[in-house]
Image (cartoon, coloured by chain):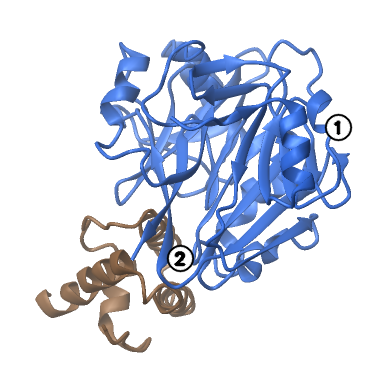
Chain colours: A blue, B brown
Amino acid sequence: MKQVLFDTQDVIEMINSGKKLILAADETQLNKLPSGSWIAGTTPYFMGEQGGILTNEKIYVTELPDFIKSSEIKLYDENNIHQIYNDAPRHGFTVLIIPASSSIHFTFALNAPNFPNFATRPLIGWIAGDSVHETEMKPKIYDGRENKPRENGAIALHVELPSNKLAEVNILNIFEQGDGDTITFPQDGFSAKTAFVNGEPVNFAEYLCKKTIDTRLLLMADLYGAKLNVSFRTIDCEHNQVDFYAPVFAGFRYKIAKPINDYFGSFLKQVPQDAGNDVFLACNCILNFLYAELEGRKFANFTGPITFGEIAYQLLNQTLVYLTIEDI
Amino acid sequence: MIIIPDESDPCWMKAISGEASPKFELLATKIILGRLTLLYEMDPTPETAAKCVAELRTYFVWNKDLPKAQSDLRIILGKAVNN
């Protein structure tokens, strides 16, 4: 398996030689990098070539291949993030990195499905984060042209491919919808007090507490077989509020996912036979890293940053997302 | 090459009305159509229908050269033929 985690000095040399890079690392390493054609987001967790790893010392490197036709780095804010799909190349893909808990994180999560030309072109990316042991997370993104950490904004790399190459976004989700109640919400949001359970309004926190829901499970919507997860952040029965890591959307029919006995084994079972061969970029959720105890364990041929929200056209949770580039 | 019918073709309305649950190939098709069928279900007015149909058709226009999108489009066109 090719090397993906590098020492900072190696990455400095790559940047200085003009390579176009997508990077992930702790900010102590990213702050040492020179200006160049790169974008980055913070995380100290990775699916490395040797397995899952937590490190502040290494940088995860994805290098744009020589065959790409063109690429453009673009920084977005809340006023223009809705243009992300319009700006994407007609034939290619876009990588997007957003810092966790920033205002643009919430803007993107809540509104991406309504952006002009939503999902018309491949968009993949992740939410940058920090060690889960930090009391106050300070996730950052980087625009390599200016090499200045930012705690808000979204950094994108638009990549145009030649006509004989094809990019495709896909997801790997170990969960299945359970057979229980159908849950809908009256409005979009990262939190909910009220939900409709089988059409009847309920205090959602109270409902979950009564059901003694395992918060490692999640809410799941099934859109023609695309399983979209929303993870529980907190269930506060005292204040009657449930918070999520991604928004729930009004009208979507959610169910609590089925329990999983062997989290890691379930992941391995889901991996497509040919997975890894054409994968250009992948990222996996921090909750999968923790619950599947991925540290020190190799996960098929997938490598990539461990992230705090995954983007496959829109924000997802507890999902491995990946982008393949194939010959056509 | 598949010809993408215009917005007046009944195949689009059948798709966004969610009459069937076919197995599509592309993740983007699943997400877009899943969202559009819900939008139409929540507000089944001619205005919403027109907006959803336009969005779905635009998606296929943008992706008409992708083999998997062509396969997904065939399913949508096939629904119109079969129903």
> Disc 2 marks which amino acid?
Asp
- The answer to whether residue A306 of the structure is visible from this angle is no
Residue A223 in view = yes
Give the secondary structure at mark 2. Answer: loop
Question: Where does the C terminus of chain A fall, quadrant-wise?
Answer: bottom left
Q: Residue at x 18, y 78 (%)?
A: B80
- Residue shown at the point (74%, 48%) measured from the top left: A38
Residue B10: horizontal and vertical position, in percent?
Answer: 26, 82
Residue receiving disc 1: A31
- Residue A284 sits above or below residue A141 on the image: above
Examine the image and state in which quarter residue B60 appears: bottom left
Q: Chain of mark 2?
A: B
**Residue type pointed to by label 1:** Asn
Residue A215 rendering spot, x and y as whole percentages: 49, 16
Q: Residue at x 38, y 57 (%)?
A: A326
Q: What residue sits right under mark 2 in the picture?
A: B43
Residue B35 appears at what percent x and percent y? 43, 57
Determine whether label 2 and label 1 are within 8 Å by CB. Answer: no
Q: Is residue B10 left or right of residue A91?
A: left
Q: Residue at x 71, y 10 (%)?
A: A133
